[in-house]
Image: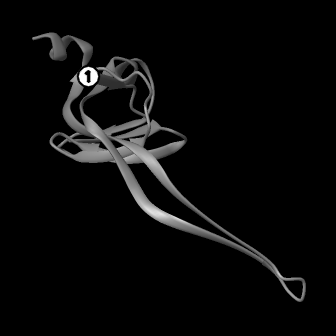
Amino acid sequence: MYAVIRSGGKQARVSAGDIIDVELLKGATDEVTFAPLLVVDDNGQAMTGGPALDQMRVTAKVVGEVKGEKIRVFKYKNKSGYRRRRGHRQRYTRLEITNIGTAHSEEA
């Protein structure tokens, strides 16, 4: 079973046990819950809308906070001696997907 979730303006395909990096979730506690956009079960049946999908939840455990790869920014204008260098490292929250199911199955 897998699901497609949205976080930080991006979508990710996840299944139970996956470890993913999403944009920094400020104030994230031990566990985070997402409402999936799409759920595909083991038989290949897709749920894309309706009351069945509204009850589905994807729960994830917060593993920690990590930094992404360094991005180098270089600005240059020809014949004027203008050069600028900058660097940037995006911060991410690392999540481990623990469960994909209904809200009732999470409590049990």
* Residue 44 visible in the picture: no
> Does dot 1 land on a helix, a strand or a loop?
strand
Q: Nearer the viewer, residue 19 or 34?
A: 19
Residue behind mark 1: 31
In the picture provided, is 68 more to the left or to the right than 85?
left
- The residue lying furthest to the bottom in this view is 79
Q: Residue at x 31, y 24 (%)?
A: 32
Question: Which of the 4 image quadrants contains residue 51?
Answer: top left
Please identify the quadrant where the N terminus is shown: top left
Local packing at callout 1 (Cα closer than 10 Å; few below 14, some 14-19, many 20+) is: some
In the picture provided, is 104 more to the left or to the right than 20?
left
Q: Residue at x 22, y 25 (%)?
A: 101
Q: Residue at x 26, y 14 (%)?
A: 103
Examine the rendered structure and indicate whether residue 88 appears above or below residue 53. below
* Residue 82 visible in the picture: yes
- The residue lying furthest to the left in this view is 108
Indicate the position of residue 21 as horizontal and vertical percent values. Answer: 34, 47
Question: Which of the 4 image quadrants contains residue 82?
Answer: bottom right
Indicate the position of residue 40 as horizontal and vertical percent values. Answer: 29, 41
Identified by mark 1, the residue type is Glu
Indicate the position of residue 70 as horizontal and vertical percent values. Answer: 46, 64
Q: Nearer the viewer, residue 80 or 48?
A: 80
Q: Nearer the viewer, residue 81 or 91?
A: 81
Please identify the quadrant where the C terminus is shown: top left
